[in-house]
Amino acid sequence: MAKKEIRVQYSGLIFFGAKLISVATGILFTLLLGSLSQEKLGAWGIFLTIIIPYFTLLSGALSFWTMRFVARDKEGAAKTGIVANMTIATIATLIYLALLPLVTQAFGLQDYALVYVLVATQIIETYLITVLEACLQAQRPQFLAYGLLIGEVLKVALAYTFVIALHLDLVGIILSLAVAFGIKIAFYLKNMWIELRQKFVFSHLKEWLKGSTFNLFSVIGDRIASVIFIMLSVYGHTIGVSYYTATQLITNVIAYSSALAFALYPKILAERKTDEVTSSLRMVLMFAIPMTAGVIAIPNSYLLFFNVSGTYVVAMPVLVIMAIDALIQTNAGFFTSILYGIESVDEEAKIPFGQVMKSRLFISFSLPYLHSAITLPIAYYALTHFANNDPLLVAAYVTGIFMIGHLISFLVLLSVLRKAVTLKIPWKSIAKYAVASAIMALILIAGHPVTRTSTLIFTGVGALVYLALLIAFDKETRNLARTMLLAVRNRMNR
């Protein structure tokens, strides 16, 4: 892979642009999911949130170290990571298929056996996409934007064909994802052909296997924390899961703003510089804050957009809580990438076990256990004493408690990071974003859209008002607008 300087703002804007386009495809895909019955959407949520993560929990273990080695230009790192991750994927898929009868019976989903057989393709594709994107993000992050567009456009086109034209329902959803992501993988492989011709380096794999102990420690913590979703299924049943899934599909858009800084991590790894941290944080929050404000302002409108019959409108409290949680997690992801970037314990292509134990990486890997210790006891008590098996209450309690856990974990992360590096938080810019977002929210509330078309129109008007206010009163926004225009002109002149 040709070693080039990573342009954080340019790569971030390209990827965020692709994410914004994917908002449209995401809306269309959400509408297709909305055509499923509430029970089938709940079954989809159980697959998405509860079952699959247990079989893909190792997908990022070796990929984490692969990216760090590729960013530091270690020979053979990309090929070694890809081959190793595919080996793990094969083993995980075989285990999944062997346990399939027990899994479907445990959740009372024997009628969806065919769906869960097809899901095996998702396991393999998740492992392969994770490692391929880790390699590309390390040195050519803009290719992730191209892959995103390919996957999203094909996903919607195929879902429409399978679900609407062929009436395959949930099977059609799984097939559309499998085929779309398969083509996305082919695109990535084509653009990494040179790296695939390099040698497999066993010494890299040996170090990664040693380091993956810490990743496994972290993902086990994540899986323990996710027991709360099993509680959601047990006490809220498929209806409670459907409320959670519907609101999550909407708030996922807020997390897209983190794409604006996704090139910062490999940049810090490769160059050991943190001078672009403040500008990257400013850019992320410029979009994350108004997105959150918009969802909080008119949650009923977005839930009606998801399903015109009003089935999910009662889940407004869940959506508001999840929007706040999405903002917290966006910030946590940003600062985690900085912490990972500044850590140099593996800089010499070695992963010394003892030093990692004493490093900031280990503190970050331990945070899921803190989250579990906070959320699981509280969730169990709340669901058994106050929820009364009401699916909506169960979903609201789970979402709220999960948010509290994320907030406390984020504050601990921030405390650790501030001791390691000087962080300049752009409070003045954040205040401007908050004021402009509040004005935008008032416009949305006044409009109170109740149809899909009016929701789209008022969302667009609110976004224009927000951007107009920032361009008028914020110098950094004007500079960003000039950067974007310059990038477009340069592309057009090539």
Image (spheres, rainbow, N blue to C red):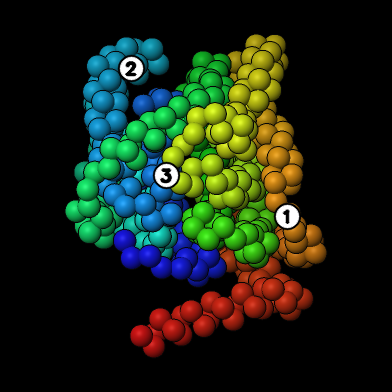
SS category of the residue bearing label 3:
loop
SS category of the residue bearing label 2:
helix
Q: Residue flagged by tag 3: what amino acid is it?
A: Ala
Crowding at mark 2 (Cα within 10 Å: few <14, some 14-19, many 20+): some
Q: Residue at x 31, y 52 (%)?
A: 75
Question: In the displayed structure, does residue 195 sit left or right of residue 146?
Answer: left
Question: In the displayed structure, does residue 242 sit left or right of residue 364?
Answer: left
**x, y percent for residue 431:** 79, 61
Q: Residue flagged by tag 1: what amino acid is it?
A: Leu
Q: Residue at x 53, y 65 (%)?
A: 8
Q: Quadrant of residue 24?
A: bottom left
Q: Nearer the viewer, mark 2 or mark 1?
A: 1
473 above or below 32?
below
Q: Which residue is mark 1?
A: 423
What number is the disc on residue 104? 2
What number is the disc on residue 349? 3
